[in-house]
Amino acid sequence: MKKLSLFACFLTLVGSNIFPVAQTKTSTAAPPSSVTRPDSIQDSGVYGYWTNMSGQGRAGGALFGNVSVEGEPLLWNPILVSVICSGTTVSTTRTDPSGKFLIPIMPVPGSLSLQGDQKRQMETHYEGCSVQASFTGFHSGTITISPRNLRDEPDLGTLTLSRAGGRAAATAVSNTIESAPAAAVKAFDKARTELMEQKTDRAEHDLEKAVQVYPPFAEAWYQLGRLQQASNSGDAKNSFSKAAAADPQFILPYEQLATLAAQAEKWQDVVDNTSHALQLDPAGTSQTWYLNALANFQLGKTDVAETSALKALAMDPLHTIPNTEQLLAVILARKADYNGALAHLRNCLTYSPNGPTADLLKQQIAQLEKKVGASK
């Protein structure tokens, strides 16, 4: 079978028929400020997302709040915030650089959606649900969404993240900054400011300066790798590898190394890096579980791939990783569970944009329907 690329992949679904997994192109344009829910980081990039969030003067009917991290300065990376109802994650969003977040409105099928009654929609979905932040190596407080929040006061207040007790297996903040000399920290902080001002060349220069002054500076290596990814994957891989070597508990480099390996179709490397990340943090992230599922499928380990894909899908209710459910459908079809595959492909159509992606899904559905019909 032809190898599957993360961005242009072809998978065998049924018999000898080869089906491409639909790809949703990511937009590099800044999203309009009038949207009622913030665009995903995958659509606009970390700093485009932050800029959009910061530019919204009010939540526009959505709930909003803040995340505070005890003992930490302003962070480089957005923090995931989830709405959990009856034990199920129903919505996710991320913080901007100051820790602010917006919880988007989820349309209710039927009359409420047609009437555009946003308040009733929010009440239907969120009343009594809890809001928590996720940041590896930290414990999150919990806020319960009350009727008052939904009807009168959309400000949920502040979620506080505190360091996990004892020595955590993993952390999203490298401890190497604590031992870095002042000159390295100054260059690192300067790079953060420059990056927020879209001065990427200057930021890259100052991150290089930070790691020259202090080579074990894991966080600086990681952020340098993020800047290098777009233009030089080899340099980025080197920086991520040095970040992981400098601080084995620093979990963020492993997901980036797995992403680079997937782009190069080095599937065992993807499994190795995602497995290492999951050993450090068994909860994982939707991206880590997706990459793990994709690589294990490519290596012929369909049962492992199915388990990982299900976990990725459960953690990503807004489908910010657009291929997860389609990958799961492909896995099920490979296992001859055609009805299960059909159910997931049909659901993909409910959130996929019109165009080539939806057309491809319809073709896959039609061929699977023929397969199921022929077996009756």
Image (cartoon, rainbow, N blue to C red):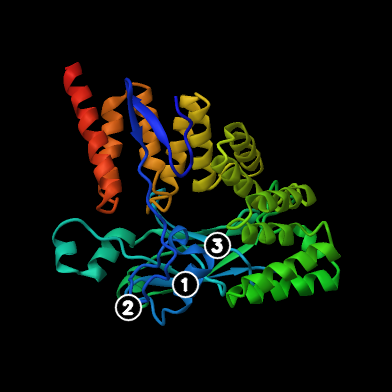
Q: Quadrant of the C terminus?
A: top left
Specify the amino acid type for callout 1.
Gly
- Quadrant for residue 261, please give it: top right
| Label located before the other in sequence (3 or 1) | 1
Q: Which residue does the image show at 62% across and 70% down from the upper left?
A: 200
Q: Is residue 28 above or below residue 309?
A: below
Q: Which of 128 and 226 is in front in this view?
A: 226
Alpha carbon distance from label 1 to label 2: 14 Å
Label 3's element? loop
Q: Position of residue 250 (x, y in %)?
A: 70, 51
Q: On screen, 221 above or below 290?
A: below
Q: Which quarter shows the N terminus?
A: top left
What is the three-letter code of the residue carrying label 3? Answer: Ile
Up-down relation of residue 209 to residue 139 (above or below): below
How packed is label 3: few (under 14 Cα within 10 Å), some, or many (20 or more)? Answer: many
Earlier in the chain: of badge 2 and badge 3, it is 3
- Return the mark for residue 65: 1
Residue on which disc 3 sits: 79
The Cα atoms of the two marked residues, 2 and 3, are separated by 26 Å
Q: What element carries label 2?
A: loop
Q: Quadrant of residue 63?
A: bottom left
Can residue 179 be seen here?
no
The residue under the point 30% across, 31% down is 341
Quick one: label 2, few (<14), some, or many (20+) residues within 10 Å? Answer: few
> Which residue lies at the image location 15% right of the left edge and 64% below the top edge?
114
Of 287 and 29, nearer the camera is 29
Label 2: which residue?
152
SS of the residue under disc 1: strand
In this rendered view, identify the residue nearer to me: 237 or 50. Answer: 237
